[in-house]
């Protein structure tokens, strides 16, 4: 049943590829600063018609939601509901309310279409009237499709973490010093990307290498839909270039790994105080008033998992501790997510954003000036732009589209 | 100059309520005269990071200074660590980075690699920067005095010579108070006292965890400390919540007898004989009056215990920082044996370095 999703995604991705490849051959002057406008248009301006099968499945879901909503409303009107039952029902209603509003709109639109149909049948003689009705009919059908598309999206399974902020971790992998330098470049790329998106980018910790590169760096990124956009960045980013440290001009290949973790709080992960050990690196001696040190590094150990986080970037111990706990919560939350996911169906595991950190996802080739994303097979021909945090959306939008299509395929095959 | 000032005030640090104290008579006239004259004469310094960026320097000049300063830091190696547990090169380098952050208005400029003639705006002149770093390394002037502030919990507090730089260990006292008031609405809206407040760190930290009705009275006998604390209180807009009173320990609190909901203090607790061997940053630059706790370091702590029994209301909470380990046990011992019946639920708590550091408990 994946026909539909696959068909659409193949079409869009190949269109995307063609666009980029052709633009490389005959570059338009302004192209690099323009967003890939066509990407999400299938659901916005010109709604594509959903297949009859999909509409059929959706119709069943809509009826189920309508039925459930009326049940819940009846229940809420009964005085004997206990407070907890009441709260639960309310919560479910709230969750459904987005879809319910759309369904109401859709039903109204369908009623309008029916009305127009019978009008057209009645006045088949009156040409002016008929023209007017046909025109209105066209609009109404278009709006109906738009609503159907929106509804479909609202019914697709969502990643609960999508709206969360995230922790970015960049680690130099194989390639020694050059990998550290590239780790720094990648870290800065995300910083610039975040800046452009109006997100807050806050460095958590940086471990510098000997040549001013980063052995490891992490940041907390906060803003609108941060995790949704960045989650596909997890994986191995490979670089091919002549390192500044290389005398003979030979091209090296090295790699950095990127991890994107959704942020969570202590409640999300049910963090208990007794599970934590907190150490400071105060050198021997009596401490307290005896010592004046600006070393406020804190190490937090989560005893059940053995996860250890050390933060020393902040100027107060309290802030270092707060940051370490933030990272710890993100790690624990991610562990829980992976555990849940591996217990789900195989299909979802095969999807992109599987979070497999060992997967090579992208290659930055400087001599050829290109960046290739191996999952969607897109090559973008200005590596400098990408490193400046511009046009990372080329890949991200394609990956989001693919995710949506996969979800749609799952939706239709799960019936 | 300020150092001599604080050493003149040194006698005040001795408890005035102790039975054996002959200082109380000696003290009083000094205290009252200090009370009436001082608040007008001490003007707190503005921390470096809050000063106006009225200076400007070529980026290459700044880089030259930075390279020089880095060289100085590296030349230290582990010399200070070996002599008195002072900072090593890597710590000095981190301080250098922070000094840059505080001194340069737009410190993203610093990452630029090209040595251009571009100018950067600074909060201090470049010559002064050379001076400051020399003070830091050669004179071992504490970094916090150099930049005029200390990052403590989520606060940035102004500090200057004559005021103890708040220590990271002391951050935990606020957590203890937070834990207590989050379970006790009565204490949350009560009046708390921070005795020997110094920069006002504890008072402001506690002000942040109390309810909207809760208040803090912070006392210190040093006019410099009171002025700096007042400045910090104002920076965090706590003027209505935190009241500063100048005077020795409980002296300015006579109207609060039996009324305090809570009492915290980080009093001087280092035994007098240990003062001469202190790390240079501490021994040479921080006010002795805030460090020296008398022969066994317990003078102020014992005085605070006696006062707490008098000033706290029933079920009121107290938390004291100590020199650690043996001093904690001695204090608990004193409370149990000499102040029998005054306190309950006494507890010794450790700091994050694993040293038994604090004594906490409740008034009966």
Image: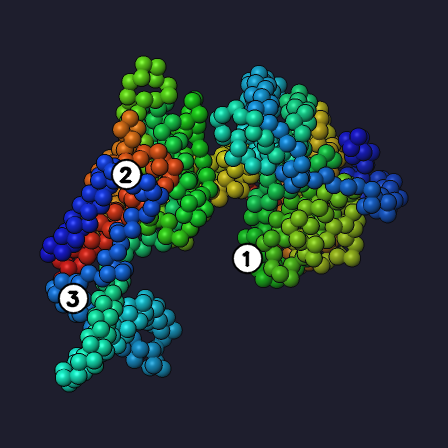
In terms of image quadrants, where is residue A122? bottom left
Q: Which of marks 1 and 2 is in front?
A: 2
Mark 1 → mark 2, Cα distance in angstroms: 64 Å
Residue lying farthest top?
A: A248
Q: Name the residue under label 1.
A: B182
First in sequence: mark 2 or mark 3?
A: 2
Circle 1 crowding by C-alpha within 10 Å: few under 14, some 14–19, many from 20: some
Q: Is mark 2 on a helix, strand or loop?
A: loop
Q: What element carries label 3?
A: helix
**Quadrant including the N terminus of chain B:** top right
Q: Mark 1 lies on which chain?
A: B
Q: Name the residue under label 2.
A: A27
Q: Is residue A384 above or below residue B138?
A: below
In terms of image quadrants, where is residue B76? top right
Q: Residue at x 17, y 63 (%)?
A: A49
Q: Residue at x 71, y 59 (%)?
A: B259
In front here: B364 or B261? B261
Counting every numbered tag in the picture gives 3
Same subunit, labels 3 and 1: the answer reads no
Q: Which residue is drawn at 39% across and 42% down?
A: A193
Residue lying farthest front?
A: A127
Q: Mark 2 lies on which chain?
A: A
Q: Mark 3 points at which residue?
A: A55
Same subunit, labels 1 and 2: the answer reads no
Q: Residue A146, position in %: x, y?
A: 25, 65
Q: Which chain carries label 3?
A: A
Mark 2 → mark 3, Cα distance in angstroms: 41 Å
């Amino acid at each position: 049943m994946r026909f539909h999703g696959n068909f659409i995604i193949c079409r869009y991705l190949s269109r995307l590829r063609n666009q980029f490849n052709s633009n490389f051959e005959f570059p338009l002057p302004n192209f690099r600063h323009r967003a890939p406008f066509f990407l999400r248009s299938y659901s916005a301006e010109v709604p594509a018609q959903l297949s009859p099968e999909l509409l059929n499945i959706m119709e069943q879901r809509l009826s189920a939601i309508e039925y459930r909503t009326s049940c819940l409303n009846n229940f809420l009107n009964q005085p004997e509901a206990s407070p907890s039952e009441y709260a639960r029902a309310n919560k479910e209603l709230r969750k459904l309310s987005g879809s319910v509003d759309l369904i109401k709109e859709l039903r109204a639109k369908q009623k309008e279409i029916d009305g127009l149909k019978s009008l057209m049948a009645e006045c088949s003689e009156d040409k002016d009237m008929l023209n007017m009705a046909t025109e209105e009919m066209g609009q109404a059908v278009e709006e109906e499709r738009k609503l159907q598309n929106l509804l479909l999206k609202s019914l697709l399974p969502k990643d609960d973490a999508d709206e969360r902020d995230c922790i970015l971790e960049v680690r130099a992998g194989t390639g020694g010093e050059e990998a550290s330098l590239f780790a720094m470049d990648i870290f800065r790329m995300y910083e610039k990307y975040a800046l452009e998106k109006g997100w807050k980018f806050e460095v958590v910790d940086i471990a510098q290498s000997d040549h001013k590169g980063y052995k490891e760096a992490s940041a907390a990124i906060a803003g609108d839909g941060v995790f949704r956009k960045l989650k596909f960045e997890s994986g191995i980013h490979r670089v091919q270039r002549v390192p500044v440290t290389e005398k003979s001009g030979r091209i090296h290949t090295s790699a950095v790994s990127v991890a994107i973790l959704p942020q969570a709080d202590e409640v999300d992960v049910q963090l208990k105080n007794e599970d934590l050990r907190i150490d400071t690196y105060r050198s021997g001696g009596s401490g307290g008033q005896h010592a004046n040190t600006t070393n406020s590094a804190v190490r937090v150990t989560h005893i059940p998992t053995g996860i250890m986080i050390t933060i020393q970037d902040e100027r107060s111990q309290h802030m270092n501790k707060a940051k370490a706990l933030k990272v710890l919560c993100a790690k624990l939350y991610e562990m829980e997510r992976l555990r849940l996911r591996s217990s789900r169906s195989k299909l979802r595991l095969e999807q992109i954003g599987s979070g497999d950190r060992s997967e090579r996802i992208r290659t930055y080739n400087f001599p050829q000036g290109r960046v290739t994303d191996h999952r969607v097979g897109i090559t973008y021909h200005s590596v400098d732009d990408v490193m400046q945090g511009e046009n990372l959306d080329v890949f991200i939008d394609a990956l989001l589209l693919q995710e949506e299509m996969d979800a749609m395929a799952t939706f239709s095959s799960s019936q | 100059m300020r150092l001599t000032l604080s050493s003149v005030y040194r006698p005040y640090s001795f408890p005035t309520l102790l039975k054996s104290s002959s200082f109380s008579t000696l003290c009083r006239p000094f205290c009252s005269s200090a009370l009436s004259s001082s608040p007008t004469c001490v003007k707190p310094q503005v921390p470096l990071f809050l000063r106006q960026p009225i200076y400007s320097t070529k980026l290459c000049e700044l880089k030259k200074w930075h390279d020089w300063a880095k060289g100085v830091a590296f030349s230290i190696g582990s010399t200070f660590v070996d002599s008195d547990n002072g900072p090593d090169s890597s710590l000095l380098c981190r301080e250098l980075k922070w000094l840059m952050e505080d001194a340069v208005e737009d410190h993203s400029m610093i990452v630029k690699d090209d040595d251009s003639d571009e100018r950067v705006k600074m909060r201090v002149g470049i010559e002064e920067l050379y001076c400051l770093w020399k003070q830091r390394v050669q004179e071992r002037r504490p970094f916090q005095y150099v930049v005029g502030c200390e990052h403590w919990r989520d606060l940035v507090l102004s500090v200057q010579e004559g005021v103890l730089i708040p220590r990271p260990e002391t951050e935990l006292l606020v957590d203890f108070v937070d834990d207590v008031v989050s379970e006790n609405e009565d204490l949350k809206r009560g009046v708390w006292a921070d005795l020997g407040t110094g920069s006002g760190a504890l008072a402001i930290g506690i002000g942040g965890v109390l309810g909207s009705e809760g208040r803090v009275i912070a006392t210190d006998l040093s006019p410099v400390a009171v002025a700096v604390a007042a400045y910090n209180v104002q920076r965090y807009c706590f003027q209505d919540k935190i009241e500063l009173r100048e005077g020795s320990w409980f002296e300015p609190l006579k109207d609060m007898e039996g009324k305090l909901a809570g009492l915290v203090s980080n009093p001087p607790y280092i035994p007098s004989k240990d003062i001469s061997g202190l790390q240079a940053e501490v021994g040479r630059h921080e006010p002795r009056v805030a460090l020296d706790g008398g022969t066994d370091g317990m003078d102020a702590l014992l005085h605070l215990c006696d006062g707490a029994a008098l000033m706290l209301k029933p079920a009121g909470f107290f938390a004291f920082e100590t020199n650690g380990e043996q001093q904690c046990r001695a204090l608990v011992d004193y409370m149990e044996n000499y102040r029998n019946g005054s306190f309950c639920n006494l507890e010794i708590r450790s700091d994050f370095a694993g040293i038994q550091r604090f004594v906490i408990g409740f008034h009966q």
